[in-house]
Image: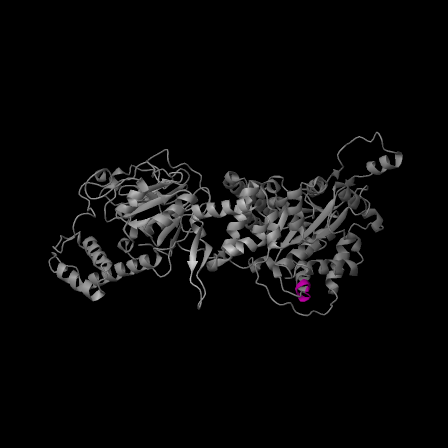
């Protein structure tokens, strides 16, 4: 039934031809509006598009994607997480599902001949966001990618072989009755409005009379299902179907009978084993760490990385690369810029489990700067206010602040509304964007100030501020600090956030090792490139520096232009989520990183080439995309919504074992909430189908326990906000 060699990377033509080969009727629809672009009434009946038509439609046809006309199969379309949860709990289990931008398509066999799709939505609660796409209706084919970026991703439950549509379970009259909130039984009532004339009805008695060619396979499947459901053995079912088959003209082959019985038996067994519970949450298999290609940094950056790893108690390759880049950032700050006014100052965030090597970054940077006698580039661990930032910049206009527990600090600011620290963050943001200019504190009255105070305040400005931040935090604190406000204000998008997913390991004993001479030589080389008489000049924020300028070559500029087009597309797709701002600094970060990479390769360089730019873009884009996904998962617009996400993510972390009611009372996550809030959250998550309360048998003589477990999160993908209710011709 499905060509599993297809993927979201396949072309529209390949997807269309792949499904057509398996007997599906394929038509073209627009990628944005999901509207058919051909007169498709004729294809709803008997006509099947041939390969020639399909190639005409989809060859070099940008903006189109293939859709499937329903007939032998029927799709239940659930458009919200609540609707998905309702389907899981109330409808016949199907092992074949397709996640969409808003919900899930549940695929069933259509033996009962459920009729054409209408625009009328299901009557079930909640939100009436359930519909059935029956015979003659149209559904977006799996593997397609919507214009929003949402993917129609097929999921087939483990242990189930899907070869033919008849392998799927039937959507029953009981299921339809539940969705439509109407009683649909027998041939009476409103049955006729849901089924095409002449379609096989489930209330019709199944006889062992022979059937004509064209009805044999359907009837064989229904007979097999009937007798398997009566708990007859495979041998008994085979004997009955052989008797029936002998009356057909012509009869099916023995192999076809055997295959049908085996397939229906497998479906029946799977349904029986899963009818009590929806699929549990299973952690998605994702790459533990970023691609190794990101570790292939230019020149001395790779050597700094090797040194960092050599003295690491716990190996953290990608955090060590962040360490290398942070050192390059502060060493080059204020002294170099590009012809497009990009400086080397960057903000970094290293996220890892506690005790798993984050502290190595501080050791590496301090050791190298002390060995080269540039330790004046080291600033304190954080800033308490805007005044503290200006005070640091006055005598350290270029510096690095290595901040431990950074996530906890942000979380504290968010919760307590610490205005002094908030003002400090605003000044740091200004520093990031004003590397080429001057920053000054806000004006306020000095009428009651003495001359010394006035003089001190007037001196609080800095030319070409160059702040490098290396924040370190654990995942829980970092994600707890994420808020829509923190995203909207632009602070987060200035960071390169690297989270290590490596498992916890025992640290090794490390002997103290001096930095390689080549690293020390490079640091001294780039710090003295301007031939400034002494460091006192560089350490005075009230004096301007004339930096050395490096130019992007034409090929590098072309790559940067192409990046801008890509970022505009990504931002447009994220507007509905309020996350578009996360890509607003991507290009600038890549240009700054290009400057660092070029000088790391050659301290005397004057040109920034395309190879370095492409490496920098790959690095920044990868981590910015991860940050977007993290924000999708963790960021909420309200404190209560944030608590919902926190609780759900924690229950998911507990895996198949879930969490007991006793654990809920004891765990710190729940202790920070009011009992009323906890009860409300658990009830809402249960009602939506995102978690379930299940009884677990105890080992030995213990009593059974009741625990909450998370349901498969693939049912709750977000995105695709296009309205599919207003036009009955639109596909799902």
Residue nearest the viewer, comparing 252 with 10: 252
* Number of numbered discs: 0
Q: Quadrant of residue 190?
A: top left
Q: Nearer the viewer, residue 373 or 525?
A: 373
Q: Quadrant of the N terminus?
A: bottom left
x, y (%) of residue 152?
40, 48
Whether 626 is among the magenta residues is: no
Q: Is residue 580 above or below residue 650?
A: above
Q: Residue furthest right?
A: 451
Left or right: where 712 falls relative to 244: right
Residue 84 seen in the current view: yes
Where residue 268 appears, x then y in whole percent?
28, 58
Q: Residue at x 59, y 63 (%)?
A: 504
Location of the C terminus by quadrant is: top left
x and y percentages locating residue 473 in the rendered image: 64, 54
**Along the horizontal axis of the image, is 583 left or right of 251?**
right
Q: Residue at x 58, y 45 (%)?
A: 560
Nearer to me, 438 or 598: 438
Q: Main secondary structure of the magenta part?
A: helix
The span shown in magenta is 307-311
Residue at coordinates 68% horizontally, 70% vertically from top-left?
509
Across and down, in percent, residue 11 comes to 40, 49
Q: Nearer the viewer, residue 410 or 135?
A: 410
Q: Quadrant of residue 517?
A: bottom right
Residue 564 visible in rendering: no
């Amino acid at each position: 039934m499905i060509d599993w060699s297809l993927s979201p990377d396949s072309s529209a033509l390949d997807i269309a031809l792949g499904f057509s080969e398996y007997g599906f009727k394929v038509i073209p629809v627009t990628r944005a509006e999901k509207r058919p672009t051909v007169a498709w009434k004729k294809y709803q009946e008997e006509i099947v598009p041939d390969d020639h038509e399909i190639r005409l439609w989809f060859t070099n046809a940008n903006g189109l994607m293939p859709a499937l006309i329903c007939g032998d199969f029927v799709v239940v379309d659930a458009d919200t997480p609540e609707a998905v949860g309702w389907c899981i709990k109330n409808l016949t289990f199907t092992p074949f599902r397709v996640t969409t931008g808003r919900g899930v398509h549940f695929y069933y066999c259509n033996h009962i001949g459920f009729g054409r799709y209408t625009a009328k939505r299901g009557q079930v609660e909640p939100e009436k966001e359930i519909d059935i796409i029956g015979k003659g209706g149209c559904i977006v084919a799996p593997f397609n990618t919507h214009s929003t970026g949402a993917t129609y991703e097929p999921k087939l439950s483990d242990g189930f072989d899907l070869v033919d549509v008849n392998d799927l379970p039937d959507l029953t009259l009981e299921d339809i009755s539940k969705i439509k909130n109407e009683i649909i039984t027998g041939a009476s009532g409103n049955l006729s409005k849901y089924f095409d004339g002449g379609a096989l009805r489930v209330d019709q008695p199944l006889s062992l009379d022979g059937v004509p060619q064209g009805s044999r396979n359907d009837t064989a499947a229904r007979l097999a299902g009937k007798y398997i459901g009566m708990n007859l053995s495979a041998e008994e079912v085979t004997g009955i179907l052989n008797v029936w088959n002998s009356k057909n003209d012509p009869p099916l082959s023995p192999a076809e009978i055997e295959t049908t019985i085996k397939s229906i038996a497998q479906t029946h067994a799977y349904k029986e084993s899963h009818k009590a519970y929806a699929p549990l949450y299973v952690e998605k298999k994702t790459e533990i760490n970023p691609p190794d290609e990101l570790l292939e940094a230019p020149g001395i950056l790779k050597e700094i990385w090797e040194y960092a790893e050599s003295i690491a108690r716990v190996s953290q390759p990608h955090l060590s690369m962040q360490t290398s880049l942070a050192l390059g950032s502060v060493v080059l700050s204020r002294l170099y810029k590009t012809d497009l006014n990009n400086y080397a100052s960057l903000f970094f965030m290293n996220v890892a489990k506690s005790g798993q090597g984050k502290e190595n970054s501080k050791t590496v940077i301090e050791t190298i700067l002390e060995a080269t006698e540039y330790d004046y580039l080291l600033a304190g661990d954080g800033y308490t206010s805007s005044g503290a930032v200006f005070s640091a910049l006055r005598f350290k206009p270029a510096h690095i602040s290595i901040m431990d527990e950074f996530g906890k600090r942000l979380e504290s600011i968010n919760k307590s509304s610490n205005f002094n620290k908030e003002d400090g963050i605003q000044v740091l943001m200004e520093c990031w964007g004003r590397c080429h200019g001057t920053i000054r504190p806000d004006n306020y009255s000095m009428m009651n100030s003495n001359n010394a105070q006035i003089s001190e305040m007037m001196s609080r400005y800095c030319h070409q501020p160059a702040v490098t931040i290396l924040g370190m935090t654990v995942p829980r604190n970092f994600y707890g600090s994420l808020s829509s406000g923190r995203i909207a204000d632009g602070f987060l998008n200035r960071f390169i956030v690297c989270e290590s997913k490596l498992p916890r390991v025992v640290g090794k004993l490390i002997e103290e090792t001096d930095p390689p001479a080549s690293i020390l030589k490079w640091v001294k080389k780039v710090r003295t490139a301007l031939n400034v008489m002494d460091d006192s000049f560089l350490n005075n924020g009230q004096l301007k520096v004339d930096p050395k300028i490096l130019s992007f070559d034409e090929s590098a500029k072309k790559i940067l232009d192409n990046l801008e087009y890509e970022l505009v597309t990504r931002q447009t797709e994220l507007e509905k989520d309020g996350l578009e701002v996360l890509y607003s600094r991507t290009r600038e970060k890549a240009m700054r990183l290009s400057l660092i990479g070029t000088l790391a390769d050659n301290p005397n360089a004057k040109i920034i080439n395309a190879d370095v730019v492409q490496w920098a873009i790959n690095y920044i884009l990868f981590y910015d995309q991860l940050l977007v996904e993290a924000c999708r998962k963790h960021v909420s617009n309200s404190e209560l919504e944030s608590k919902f996400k926190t609780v759900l993510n924690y229950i998911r972390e507990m895996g198949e074992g879930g969490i007991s009611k006793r654990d809920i009372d004891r765990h710190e996550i729940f202790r920070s909430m009011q009992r009323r809030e906890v009860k409300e959250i658990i009830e809402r998550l249960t009602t939506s189908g995102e978690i379930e309360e299940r009884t677990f048998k105890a080992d030995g003589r213990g009593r059974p326990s009741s625990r909450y477990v998370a349901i498969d999160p693939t049912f709750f993908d977000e995105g695709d906000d296009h309205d599919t209710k207003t036009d009955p011709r639109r596909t799902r």
